[in-house]
Image (cartoon, helix red, strand yellow):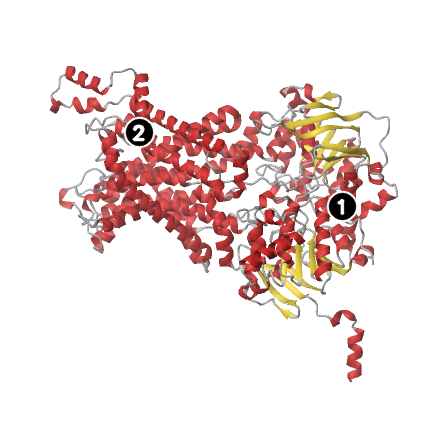
Amino acid sequence: MSHVTLTAAPETPGAPDTAAPETQAPDEAAVPRRPRISRLQPGLVLSWLVLGLVALWTIAPGFFTSHSATSGTARDKLLPPGDGHLLGTDELGRDLYSRIVHGSINSVTGALVAVAVGLVVGTLLGLVAGSLGGVTDAVMMRIVDVLLSIPGLLLSLSIIIILGFGTVNAAIAVGVGSVASFARLARAEVLRVRRSDFVEAAFGSGGTFVAVLRRHILPNSAGSVLALLALQFGAAILAISTLGFLGYGAPPPTPEWGLLIAEGRNYVATSWWLTTYPGLVVVAVVLSANRISHSIRKVQP
Amino acid sequence: MRRHLFSRVGQAALVLWAAFTVAFILLQALPGDALLIKYQNPDMGLSPREIEDIRASYGADTPLFLQYVQSLGGFLTGNLGYSVQAGVPVVDQLAANVPSTLALAGLGFLAAVILAAAIAFLSSLAPFSWLRDALQALPSLFISVPVFWLGIVLIQVFSFQLKLIPVINPPEALGLVLPVATLAIPVSAPLTQVLIRSIDDVRTQPFVAVARARGGSNAWVLSHHVARNAVLPAITIAGVLLGELIGGAVVTETVFGRNGIGQLTQEAVNSQDAAVLQAVVVLAAAAFVLVNLAVDLLYPVLDPRLKRKAGALT
Amino acid sequence: MTGILTAGAAAAGAPTLTVPVLELENLSVSYADRHRRHRRVIHDVSLSIAPGEVVALVGESGSGKSTTAQAVIGLLAGNGRIDGGSIRLNGTDIAGWSQKRLETIRGAKISLIPQDPTSSLNPVATVGSQVEEVLRLHTKLPKAERRQRVLELLERVGIPDPGRRARQYAHELSGGMKQRVLIAAAIALQPQLIIADEATSALDVTVQRRILDLIDDLRAESGTAVLFVTHDLGVAADRADRTVVLQGGRIQEQGPTYEVLARPTSPYTRQLIADAPSITGAPSVAAGEARPLPDAGRDNAVEVRNLVQEFAAGRNLPAFRAVDGVTFSVPRGTTHAIVGESGSGKTTTARALAGFQRPSGGHIIICGQDLSALDAKGLRLFRKHVQLVYQNPFTSLDPRQTIARIIEEPLLNFDAVPRQRRDAAVRDLLARVSLPESLLAKHPRELSGGQRQRVAIARALVLNPEVLILDEAVSALDVTVQSQILALLEELQRELDLSYVFITHDLAVVRQIADTVSVMSNGRQVEQGTVSEVFLNPQHSYTRELIDAIPGNRKAQP
């Protein structure tokens, strides 16, 4: 299955390989300047703050909440947000805020494991395919095509059937689902950078393959991979919470964002906070990751 | 041209075969045994001897390669095996569940396309930059929302707060509104992003300025030159959208308690009913391969630049 | 009283009797930057174009010539705005017109022939429909008549078989053909003014000449005024009645072309004329003043014998021969130019010389070493002797490295050189290419195009090679920068006894820098010899056509 590539550039029989007609960008007369990073973008700052806060929740949940995440008193069940319980309580009287804070351990580490699996396996596949080319490339990319042909969720479910339910297994399953994206990006980046004049010039001045890879190809591909990393982190948070919601992730009473929403679903008519708040946290984290990914892509020289 | 067609169909068949093999290796060849889960259950009160017999009747004790060949042969002839849990042919289960999922996915896709096109083209025509920015921020928001949560929120708002749509036994058409919206919103996001980006790309192309220099207005140029060029890249992500659509449908069906492939899949995973999941995976892969095949064959028709290349192969 | 008035009008001369087609008066334009601060790029530009007159607006990149043209047609970029002055079309000021109003005159009264024909045509619409578009927008002709008119127009601009061509798409047409289609659309409604914005810069010289001839013919036929926006003083010299020289958004000089060229008053114009190879090169060759011939007794730094380069074209197709039997030699310390248009095989030859392609046949001997006899490792070590300088200095430098790192890198590829010696070598080279040491810690994006090309040359020299392959190394640069780089290359050649193979499409540059030259066409070497032989007595018809097509040859006459 060859995918129609986005760059369906036509051949240009009449185009010269020579004269570069001057292009007149409005700013061209200006002395080239270093792109300014100094101008603060509020959305981006907020995104980093959100991810920072969630990271702290993961590292030291006890610092943010004194309530237990797994036990509560029946007397306090289904309290609306308010005094004593910032975001209310669930059907067993457990503090929802505390469960969200502690839930970040499962969700965030799960997403990190997933992204690590995708990054290591996928990038390696892509690098090798892009660097070696030829038959190796063709075979590897067909394998990636096959992985892409199975919808991510179904692929994850297939892996969960083998590995069994649980946080780590769900994370690995999600990671395998992202291998294809990393592989394709890494390969595309290697090919893009390899075709550039400066890489050829580096070979032309006697550079060995390893030296050129280290000096030019890796540094120039890193930005895009980093951007994908942030994007996939957000996607992994989503996917893990989906698996948790379906009941294939962490088993109850472990707090996990997807599972929290699944549990709160039974009380959706009466206790809106049980589903709304965990959901908002997921949205905030994923949105932040996407925003950061976007900013990394834009910083590229 | 005919040779091109054959080669593309051949490639598609190859990917499909590979997907089948991957699914087989994952689901049949590796440990995890639905039969044991079902029949070792003490409630059944079966002796080990009886379990062996049952296993033999399902063909679980034949050598792996033979199983593979039989299974592949079965798939090619439309026999997708037996569901261990339900004890009926998988084909029957699929036949019972596919139509409802197809209706949901089809309507969801349609709604997603309309939503994406509306956002993308409105944002490029928006007279104020704040409006443009707001419209262009929508897909990032849509893509960040968990499908299942979106469904629950929609139920909360429209069924419980506004009481517009009854939760229990709503009329058929009305009952589809929320599931379709739940599915369409996240699926529309990648499409919108690709559309916005390609509209922006195309608008900077010199031929757009040249058309303006001929006296074409903004709207004229958008409809006569930008639209068709901008839609082309969006078509190439049809396969990706299909994956999102299938994953989204599984979750949406669970949230809204609708029958369909989603529920079937979930039951299969819960009972480790590999044959069912394998059939679903291969079905999804087949749909993906067909969609991409269609895109590959259709693309040269829509983009004249590729027509000659495709023709040159013959 | 009446008598005085009449006398005054008469004294002002003939031009005032006719209303100019276009008259700019103190036009000022500015662009907003990201912080919404407006920076002025066009300062008080005043010029006028009489009916049927051809005026050239000449300037280098950033001079504001394209911005001026965009302002006239009312299509400034979104962040641009007209700060003051007037744009009078037939006496009516259109500077303050709304887009809606401007749309009625764009394409009808003023039309545009754009720069790059390939990207200026919608790739998914037939070319005929794009000519027809003008008629759809501005006339109420019924469909059948529009179609008929399109065919007439295509025929008029010299497109054979217009019925078939009209139904084709841009990619099915050659560059020259595409430009003809765009011209057909531009003349469709017989506008009073045609703006040709670098209309031929992207084309090969022979095609460029035919297109310019066509514009000349059409103008003579219909009396349309033409504003040529160009960086090429040669084009202005050949084609324009009057020339306006723009620099930094200000008019430096304007007047009849022959006067501007013969008696330039502004120093900038003088510099521009001095730097333009097509204007200045011709007389010296005519007078036999080409560079001194190379010493006879010197050994050859480069010898190419019967070079053949083939590429696989497809499973059942015969291999495509990009280079077919090229033979030349370059005596040490001299420059050999390879000239040709796109698709001539000159770049393929350069890449084979630089060791990036294994020749399909023939021999390349550099400094006594046959390249085809080398294995991969041998080739890598041999790269010390031959280096390539690329056309585009924006892509040939790694954007993530500092200038110091870029120049030093080749030294890291061979026997270890101590850090201090590397630093010294980098500083020495920076001085040789006349760049300040303050650039060492900077990144390529902070440098101008000319500075970047100097860095690229420094990098190529750091290994002390004997041979430099220059692949269109000055083509992407403005003429003044180009002339500086050419001077630098000559100086380096004298000091370091370098041998150059100079790949170019620009015959005018060849006259300036080369000792010997090969002319290539469709992969074949059609002519070879010393520069003065080839220029003064071209043997092959293609060479003659190339020489004739050099803009500036026709030299404006009063």
As shown in the figure, which amino acid type bears the numbered disc 2? Ser
Q: Is residue C504 visible?
A: yes
- The x and y percentages for residue A33 are 59, 48
Q: Which residue is mark 2?
A: A158
- The x and y percentages for residue C544 are 79, 41
- The x and y percentages for residue A237 are 34, 38
Q: Mark on residue A111?
A: none
| Marks 1 and 2 close (CB-CB < 8 Å) | no
Chain letter of mark 1 equals C
Assign a secondary structure to mark 2: helix
Between residue C186 and residue C25, name the one nearer to us: C186
Q: Mark on residue C549?
A: 1
Same chain for labels 1 and 2? Say yes or no.
no
Between residue C79 and residue A138, name the one nearer to us: A138
Assess disc 2: are there few (<14), some (14-19) or many (≥20) residues with their C-alpha within 10 Å of its C-alpha: many
Chain letter of mark 2 equals A
Left or right: where C153 falls relative to B301: right
The structure residue drawn at horizontal position 23% and vertical position 44%, both measured from the top left corner, is B256
Left or right: where C441 falls relative to C336: left
Q: Is residue A247 visible?
A: no
The structure residue drawn at horizontal position 39% and vertical position 35%, both measured from the top left corner, is B290
Assess disc 1: are there few (<14), some (14-19) or many (≥20) residues with their C-alpha within 10 Å of its C-alpha: some
Outermost residue, right direction? C287
> Given this view, does label 1 or label 2 mark the residue nearer the observer?
1
Between residue B31 and residue C107, name the one nearer to us: C107
Assign a secondary structure to mark 1: helix
Residue at mark 1 to residue at mark 2: CA–CA distance: 68 Å
As shown in the figure, which amino acid type bears the numbered disc 1? Ala
Q: Image quadrant of residue C372?
A: top right
